[in-house]
Amino acid sequence: MPAKVELDLFSGRPNPTWELTHVESDEILRLLSSLPETTGDRAPEEGLGYRGIVLTPPPDAAFTEVVVAGGVALATDANGRIHHLLDRDRALERRLLETGRGRIAADIIDAVARELA
């Protein structure tokens, strides 16, 4: 079962979601596993507009949920422990966003990409 992605963007309507291919899932999980642990108690962004990307990995992955925003990936393991991973240059966040091309509206992808620039 491949991973699922949710763009945490809207407040009054459903967020855009899509499913990754197996190849994309493998690539994203490899990229995620390469991120170094960092310190901090950073919480996901709040408020209106783009707040980050939520990744739901396949059941056999090391993490049950990953929230990627602002250069950090908060990855929750099966025991509920949250791992703070450094997403240098927002590479994981950008790659996750790019997997949405052709699956969700291009104007949404482009607007979020501008925020990440």
Image (cartoon, rainbow, N blue to C red):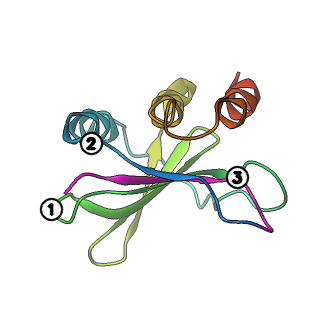
91 and 38: which is toward the camera: 91
112 and 44: which is toward the camera: 112
Q: Marks 3 and 2, Cα distance to the nearest angstrom?
A: 22 Å
Mark 1 or mark 3, earlier in chain: 3
Mark 1 closeness class: few <14, some 14–19, many ≥20 residues within 10 Å: few
Circle 3 SS class = loop
Residue type at mark 2 is Ser
35 displayed left or right of 17: left
Circle 2 SS class = helix
Q: Which residue is mark 1?
A: 60
| Residue 63 location, quadrant | bottom left
| Residue 109 location, quadrant | top right
Q: Which residue is mark 3?
A: 51
Between marks 1 and 2 in the image, the one whose residue lies nearer the viewer? 2
Which residue is pictured at 51% across the width and 30% down the height? 101
Mark 3 or mark 2, earlier in chain: 2
- State the mark number for residue 25: 2
| Tag count | 3
Quarter of the C terminus within the rendering: top right
Q: Are marks 3 and 2 in contact (CB under 8 Å)?
A: no
Residue type at mark 1 is Asp
Mark 3 closeness class: few <14, some 14–19, many ≥20 residues within 10 Å: some
- State the mark number for residue 52: none
Q: Which residues are magenta?
A: 1-12
Quarter of the N terminus within the rendering: bottom left
Point out the residue furthest to the right here.
Answer: 48
